[in-house]
């Protein structure tokens, strides 16, 4: 009887050993927890990458405004004698004149076509500078009529009077013609007022 019990116990032990698993069973992983952890890791990596490559804005720099350069006015350029400006004397005080009278060829004088003639005016030096070589009348506007100025040939002090002349040739076409002239100094700078412009008026018949 005792031997049967022992045999039964051995058989039972063998059966239990055969039914037991060879390796311990690992617990089933939480899939949702794994996915959440992975997502958090990816988000953290993107955040670090964006922070590393985001440019830092620099403070705005101010562009200096250029200072305007002084420029001479048109009046200064046209009316100022450089030599007199350097001496501190305006050109209008140095060179000036007034018309006194016509000496030859009064206004409306009749001419034949192509006739040569000399027009002479008397003018007065009302400036502060003495006239000499280079002071002549020059063509301003109107019909030039081949006008050629005649040199003064004399020295004219301030307050002095002088005759100035221009050699003309009358046009070949019948009609009335006028020619306007103005005084210039040796530097080619004209002077005198519009009211004292020198002119000649003829009638070609």
Image (cartoon, helix red, strand yellow):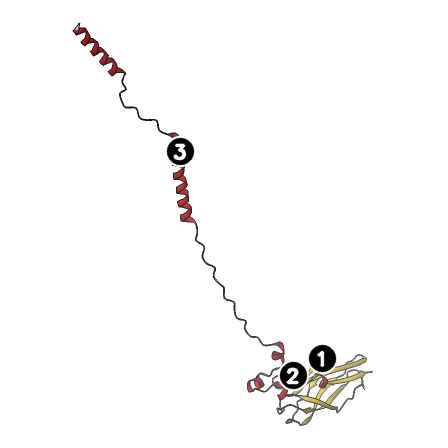
**Residue 166's quadrant in the figure?**
bottom right
Instruction: Looking at the image, tell me whether mark 2 or mark 1 is earlier in sequence order.
Output: 1
Per the image, label 1 sits on a secondary structure element best described as: strand
| Residue shown at 72% from the left, 85% from the top | 195
Image mark for residue 35: 3
- From this view, report whether residue 131 is shown above or below residue 68: below
Q: Which residue appears at 68% of the width and 89% of the height?
A: 97
Residue sitting at x 42%, y 46%? 50
Q: Which mark is residue 141?
A: 1
Secondary structure at numbered mark 2:
strand
- Residue 134 visible to an observer of this rendering: no
Front residue of 76 and 143: 76
Q: Left or right of 63: which side holds 128?
A: right
Residue 68 position in % (x across, y down): 54, 71
Q: CA distance from mark 1 to mark 3?
A: 100 Å
Pick whichever of labels 1 and 3 is earlier in the sequence.
3
Please rate how many residues cluster around mark 3, counting C-alpha atoms within 10 Å: few if below 14, some from 14 to 19, many from 20. few
Q: Residue at x 16, y 7 (%)?
A: 2
Spot the residue most to the left: 2
């Amino acid at each position: 009887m005792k031997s049967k019990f022992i045999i039964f116990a051995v058989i039972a032990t063998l059966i239990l050993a055969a039914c037991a698993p060879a390796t311990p069973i690992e617990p089933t992983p939480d899939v949702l927890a794994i996915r959440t952890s992975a997502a958090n890791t990816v988000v953290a990596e993107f955040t670090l990458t964006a922070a590393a490559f985001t440019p830092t804005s620099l403070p705005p720099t101010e562009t200096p405004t250029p200072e305007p350069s002084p420029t001479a006015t048109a009046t200064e350029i046209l009316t100022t004698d450089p030599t007199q400006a350097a001496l501190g004397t305006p050109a209008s005080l140095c060179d000036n004149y007034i018309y006194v009278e016509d000496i030859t060829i009064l206004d409306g004088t009749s001419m034949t076509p192509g006739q040569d003639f000399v027009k002479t005016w008397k003018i007065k030096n009302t400036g502060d500078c003495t006239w000499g070589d280079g002071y002549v009348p020059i063509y301003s506007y109107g019909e030039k009529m081949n006008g050629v100025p005649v040199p003064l040939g004399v020295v004219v002090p301030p307050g002095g009077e002088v005759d100035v002349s221009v050699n003309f040739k009358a046009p070949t076409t019948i009609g009335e013609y006028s020619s306007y002239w103005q005084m210039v100094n040796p530097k080619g700078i004209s002077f005198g007022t519009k009211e004292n412009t020198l002119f000649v008026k003829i009638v070609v018949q």
